[in-house]
Image (cartoon, rainbow, N blue to C red):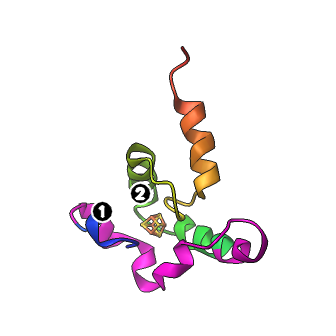
Amino acid sequence: MNRLYHESEDWVRHGACRRYDPELFFPVSSVGPGGSDAELAKAICRSCPVRQECLTWALRAGEADGVWGGTTPEERRYLRRELAPAV
Ligand code: SF4
């Protein structure tokens, strides 16, 4: 998993990313040169058995960096706006 402080979450132990370099999941950018790392990380997430748990956690935690649950930070910002209750 990407960061140690998430080890308390049970689903973390089943993440497909545990077998890869964590830096792959924290590209400098999701476009340009970092875009290929982000796309590779997202491809790994697509086969991950705990993708939904991971994405839910990242949205709730407001995780601002890295690929989580198959989403980039920009995609999570979009999802948070879409899921926010209308006021
Ligand atoms: S969804 Fe992606 S970042 Fe989350 S645990 Fe799975 S492989 Fe890791």
> Which residue does the numbered mark 2 point to in the structure image?
54
Q: Quadrant of residue 10?
A: bottom left
Query: Label 2: few (<14), some or many (≥20) within 10 Å?
Result: many
Q: Which mark is residue 59?
A: none
Q: What residue do we see at 59% from left, 44% from top?
A: 77
Marks 2/1 in contact by CB < 8 Å: the verdict is yes
Label 1 Cα neighbours within 10 Å, binned few <14 / some 14-19 / many ≥20: some
Give above or below for 83 relative to 79.
above
- Identify the residue at image location x=64%, y=51%: 74
Q: Which residues are magenta?
A: 8-37
Q: Nearer the viewer, residue 47 or 65?
A: 65
Amino acid, disc 1: Trp
Q: Does the stretch in magenta take in 59?
A: no
**Residue under circle 1?**
11
Given residues 33 and 11, the one toward you in this image is 33
Gap between marks 2 and 1, in whole Å? Answer: 8 Å
| Mark 1 residue CB less than 8 A from any atom of ligand 1 | yes
Give the vertical position of 37 relative to 82 (above or below).
below
Residue 8 position in % (x across, y down): 21, 63
Q: Quadrant of the C terminus?
A: top right
Mark 2 lies on a secondary structure that is: helix
Q: Secondary structure beneath disc 1?
A: helix
**Vertical placement of 19 versus 76: above or below?**
below
| Residue farthest top in this picture | 87
